[in-house]
Amino acid sequence: MIYLTYSRSLGEEEKRRFSKVGAEIKSVELYFPELAHEEICIYFYSKDSIRGAPAEFIPLDHPQYNSRIKHINNPTKYSIVFSKWMTSCDNRIERILIISHEFQHVFQYIGHKKGYLYACILRDYGDDGHGMAVQTIPSEKDADRKSKDILAKMFGEEGVREFVNDLISSENLKDRNFADYFDSLNMEEEYDFVNEVNKLWDKKAMNSVIEGMKKSPTRLQNLILQNHNFAEEVI
């Protein structure tokens, strides 16, 4: 079950535009029967982006996240925050892709919390103290694969191909790079994001990296350690 909530600073016109996104969210929800009995807060934010992204999944039971989203007044454990970018995007396929992507993160967190949290640590600190490229993170690739599958079911393979071709012809390099990546996702092969996270974790010797952080942690490292401690509490 999902709850739609709005930022208090949104005007009536902005809420009306978000209502269209709300209808699309409910259509995507049907492709996640595993979440049918979960309560998820959908929060429509008044900002144009969330840390540079159009949307973000926020686990409300995570102390690190819970401390910075006090404006979400909802008793659920999980929230997806959508920025105003969603109301200005005129490409329905792109909106559905983003919605599907975030719902898959909810699914990952509920079913494989430790793997998801490890993926977040790799994302933030995996390349010698620098964040890794998003598309190299297994949890992100898994979410994009789910989005691609849902797009094919909703718009057909031809619709997905048209969407990719439009991005390929874009003047925006970021769009073209994403098109190449998205097109390369092989939906025929099996993909276990937790297994891929574990392999990447070992490859980058993250257990040793975590131990090294404990000596004299920076602010970022303190956040990483908090995330790691929370992950280690998962049974």
Image (cartoon, grey):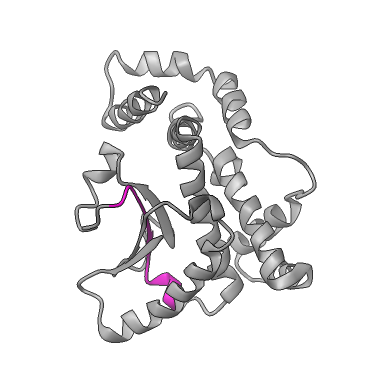
Task: Return the residue found at the far bottom.
Answer: 13
Q: Residue 92 falls in which quadrant of the image?
A: bottom right
Q: Quadrant of the N terminus?
A: bottom left
Q: Quadrant of the C terminus?
A: top left
Q: Residue at x 58, y 69 (%)?
A: 94
Residue 123 rendering spot, x and y as whole percentages: 48, 37
Q: Is residue 136 above or below residue 232?
A: below
Residue 60 colored in magenta in the image? no
Residue 197 rendering spot, x and y as whole percentages: 57, 30
Q: Residue at x 27, y 17 (%)?
A: 216
Q: Is residue 214 above or below residue 50?
A: above
Q: Residue at x 48, y 55 (%)?
A: 36
Instruction: Count the marks.
Output: 0
* Residue 169 visible (yes or no): no
Q: Which span is picked out in magenta? A: 76-87
Residue 201 rendering spot, x and y as whole percentages: 54, 24
Q: Residue at x 47, y 75 (%)?
A: 23
Q: Residue 138 falls in which quadrant of the image?
A: top right
Q: Is residue 30 above or below residue 141?
A: below
In this view, the residue in front, 204 or 36, is 36
* Residue 25 visible (yes or no): yes
